Amino acid sequence: MTECVECGADVALHEDLEAGEIVDCATCGAELEVVGTDPVALETRPNSKKTGVSEP
């Protein structure tokens, strides 16, 4: 497990995770992008609805 960069909650990830995948935090709903896999690194997805950016 790794931590959500928004709220610090544990985010459950599957074993065959790949960079570029989008995962959701079950606690705060943030959309997180996998930017590294060894070690796992997550960043907030730029177009995340959580940020208030409207999608076309």
Image (tube, grey):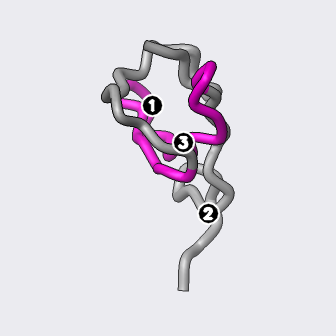
Q: Identify residue type, mark 1.
A: Cys
Mark toward the start of the polypeptide (1 vs 2): 1
Q: What element carries label 3?
A: strand
Give the residue number, with chain letter if any, for mark 2.
Answer: 47
Q: Which of 49 and 24 is in front in this view?
A: 24
Instruction: Judge depth for marks 1 and 3 and give the one in front.
Output: 3
Inter-mark Cα distance, 1 to 2: 16 Å
Residue 14 x/y as whole percent: 31, 29
For residue 46, which quarter of the picture? bottom right
User: Which residue is located at x 50 percent, y 40 percent?
Assistant: 30
For residue 55, which quarter of the picture? bottom right
Residue 47 x/y as whole percent: 61, 63
Residue 26 x/y as whole percent: 34, 29
* Up-down relation of residue 29 to residue 53 (above or below): above
Q: Point out which mark residue 28 bears.
A: 1
Q: Relative to 15, is 31 on the left or the right? A: right
Instruction: Judge depth for marks 1 and 2 and give the one in front.
Output: 2
Q: Identify residue type, mark 2.
A: Asn
Q: Alpha-carbon neighbours of circle 1 within 10 Å: few (<14), some, or many (≥20)?
A: few
User: Which residue is located at x 54 percent, y 42 percent?
Assistant: 32
The residue segment tinted magenta is: 20-40
Q: Identify residue type, mark 3.
A: Leu
Q: Relative to 13, is 38 on the left or the right? A: right
Q: Nearer the viewer, residue 24 or 41?
A: 41
Mark toward the start of the polypeptide (3 vs 2): 3
Q: What element carries label 1?
A: loop
For residue 34, which quarter of the picture? top right
Give the residue number, with chain letter if any, for mark 3.
Answer: 32
User: Which residue is located at x 47 percent, y 50 percent?
Assistant: 21
Query: Quick one: quadrant of the N terminus?
Result: top left
